[in-house]
Amino acid sequence: MTSIQSFKKIITALFMGLVSGLTIVLFFKVLDWIQIFHSTHRHYIFLLPFVWLILKLTKKMTLYFPVSINEIYSTTPLTYKYWNKFSFFFNFAGSVLGHFSGASIGREGVAVSLTSSLAQLFRLDWMYWRGIVVASSFGIATGSPWIALVFLFEVFNSNLNQKILTLIMAWVGCLIMQNFQVPELLPKFFVLGVNSFGDKLFFVISAAIIIGIVSRAYKAIYFNLKNRFDQQSIWLSLGLIFLTSIILFNPQFKDIHSLSLPQFNQLISGDMSVDFIFHKIAFTLFFVSMGFWGGDFVPSVLIGSGLGIILAKYFSIDPTFGLMLGSFAFFCGLTRLKWTALTLTALLVGFHQLIWMYLFLTICRWFSGQSSIYTNKN
């Protein structure tokens, strides 16, 4: 690669990092407003059938464009070439509508799809920039450029130049996030070392197996439901979503709506119920399988963290130890991205518990099965 080509690619990475960072900040700020609106209202939940129909018709009446990480991962140069030129605006508006109506979905998938649409809008070479764009936008959405580099390493084959460009793009985007004071999903916390080595080891093995099996079941149900929902009639789907909106209108399910961000504040105090985790898994599975536009990262962090706390209490282990190990374990099981999950955990609590993190995520990955929701393999 000549010096002129290198310079152009560096400028492109800087520009993409700037635009991607600003876009993700705007999207996250809108979601914050939605959470505030949801705190004092409930009737928006009856918009679910109408929003789903809008999303379904938008996909049907336009040229193809991806709305999830696994669709972006599977995109070829030919399909990339024919993405709808308005895909960025469709993704942004459709994802906002999905969250506003209360669908239990994540946000990192939207960040990746928005940035990928920008890459198509600027006519970048997809096969060269795909890994850079996907990894960088994931890193920006999670708040760390190092996550982007690890994600690139685990998911894509890349050369040294692509790794450098990924780090540049992610770093610029993360600086934008910090400048606009976008809060972290989970605040950093200190893990108490109050349990014996034997108790910790027993907990690590047992809890990792349980979370691994739960994530394996989640993926199996997800792939099965997605195939069924893709094949069934639009009227039956509308009926199911309308019935779900009636169920979710019940005050006891208010915490399940959208990202469930207020529940993240309860994690540090060790306050989490089995019922909430069960409901969060069930409704997230339904909405993601049904085709609402969004990701699985935020729900997976909440589910994994909650399971870690619940299992820690059951095994008489310090809840912060369970929270640390569970925080990104369910995500690891869903995606099989052990090193990304390990880095996310280490950046959350520090590196002094690294051996326990590694052992926990390794066992969880063993029992989670070979499929991945990000690479769409099953």
Image (cartoon, helix red, strand yellow):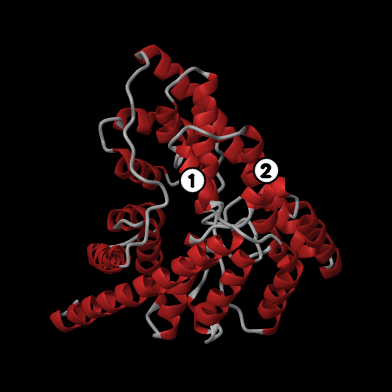
Q: Extreme left residue here?
A: 3
Residue 78 visible in this rendered orientation of the protein: no
Q: Residues within 10 Å of mark 2 (few under 14, many from 20)?
A: some
Is 75 situated left or right of 222 in this image?
A: left
Q: Secondary structure at mark 2?
A: helix
- On the image, the x and y values in percent for residue 40 come to 62, 59
Numbered mark located on residue 264 in the image? 1
User: Looking at numbered disc 2 in the image, what kind of residue is underneath it?
Assistant: His
Q: Residue at x 31, y 38 (%)?
A: 349
- On the image, the x and y values in percent for residue 96 come to 57, 70
Is 58 situated left or right of 372 in this image?
A: right
Reply above or below: 240 against 186. below
Q: Secondary structure at mark 1?
A: helix
Foreground: disc 2 or disc 1: 1
- On the image, the x and y values in percent for residue 296 come to 55, 54
Q: Which residue is under mark 2?
A: 279
Closest to the observer, 311 or 66 = 311
